[in-house]
Image (cartoon, grey):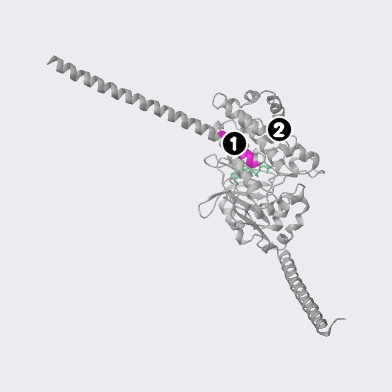
Amino acid sequence: MVKQADLVIICVTVGVALGVLIACATFFAARWYKKRIRLIRSSNDPGSTTLPIRTNGLEASTEISASLTSSIAVSGSDNLQRKTHYFGWWNHQTKDPVSPASGILKYSYKEIQKATKNFTNILGEGSFGTVYKATMATGEVVAVKMLAPNSKQGEKEFQTEVLLLGRLHHRNLVNLLGYCVDKGQRMLVYEFMSNGSLSNLLYDEDKDLSWDDRLQIAVDISHGIQYLHEGAVPPVIHRDLKSANILLDHSVRAKVADFGLSKEEVFDDHKSGLKGTYGYMDPAYISTSKFTMKSDIYSFGIIIFELITAIHPHQNLMEYINLAAMDYDGIDGIIETQLVGKCNLEEVRKLAKIAHKCLHKSPRKRPSIGEISQGIMMIKQRRLVKEDTMSFASSNYSRTLSRIEDQQVELSRIATTMNQREGR
Ligand SMILES: Nc1ncnc2c1ncn2[C@@H]1O[C@H](COP(=O)(O)OP(=O)(O)OP(=O)(O)O)[C@@H](O)[C@H]1O
């Protein structure tokens, strides 16, 4: 029989255990409830939902709206088009859609009108609209892209461009300085790239691009893409890499331009919803409609071959590449004539090999932008080491030569002294 005292002890123990259990349950339930409330609040406030852009040694600087990045970031499918509802908050805040935190300036129509001399100084024309050269009140020279009227596609691209570029900064991306939403017009203000586009430089008659320039341009582009793919969090896919979207500054340093400007009209298969530019488009994307970082890599491979051959992808570049791939030195036969005899063939072959890997049929087998970047840098560095070794060798040789000359002078001096003594 259980004694009464034991019964009391058992009851107290069970009671205490039950109390502790209830206290724990209440504590965890309260924490879970608080967390949920916080999550609901933040999801209702797009402005506060920001994800950091990782610097990763790639010179990123600010933050990016989560709602935007989820539509731009890597997904493997055609997210950009499907997730346009994320821009809903933009449409409800048309007064000043860009957060001041983005660090870009808002201009009035009048300011831009004055800076462009009433829109007379045209730099070029793209599917987005006309691009003007402008001198702002501060004296700064900029490029102004004016959105063509009634362009729905352009409207979306405009939003993407302002939101994304306003927060992505890298020395190899064309910097967005400001924007204008005024008098029914939408404009983007960029840093001015005085040497225009790579395609203009490659295909204009009076261009002059040395092999060194081209190698440096390849390095610059790779760094721009590396920042997008590996520096930004979440990663960003450009989707329309081509020589026309690579701009060059006064010292022929290259920057990647035209983010978020998907151009349906360039590729005439509207039904498929494919975006990009014919000739640069990854065949795997065409067959699967899945756009990945490796599709950007494919386009970059085409740009590298343009740098080597100055053959436009619309002029059977792929056929020349395939022919050249049959021999180790096949690329020698399609190097742009301007470069023949003025470039290091070994370097050209190495760069072509990297470009070839970018065009691999299977996207998975294409290298990452980090690997490509490293590969191109190695071509440059190897040359520098060679030059260093040669100059070291030649400086050693001249030092030995001058030592021999010194010794000869000394010997002849001794001989003269001895002769003089003997003569005395
Ligand atoms: N930041 C800039 N600085 C100097 N010139 C520029 C700048 N941006 C664009 N341009 C000039 O304007 C032209 C048109 O540019 P835009 O980006 O609108 O079109 P695109 O890229 O050539 O073609 P598409 O938009 O059809 O792909 C370019 O070829 C270039 O010469």
Query: Could you say which quadrant of the image residue 223 lies in?
Result: top right
The secondary structure that most of the magenta stretch takes on is helix
**Which portion, as a residue range, is magenta?**
369-379
* In this picture, residue 407 sits left or right of residue 323: left
Residue at mark 2: 314
Q: Residue at x 15, y 18 (%)?
A: 421
**Residue 108 at x, y = what percent?**
60, 58
Q: Residue at x 22, y 18 (%)?
A: 415
**Residue 103 at x, y = what percent?**
59, 58
Indicate the amino acid at tag 1. Answer: Ile
Taking the magenta stretch, the answer to whether it contains residue 116 is: no
Q: Secondary structure at mark 1?
A: helix
- Direction top: furthest residue: 423
Q: Ligand 1 lies in which image quarter? A: top right
Indicate the amino acid at tag 2. Answer: His
Q: Secondary structure at mark 2?
A: helix
* In this picture, residue 404 sits left or right of residue 313: left
Looking at the rendered image, the quarter that the C terminus falls into is top left
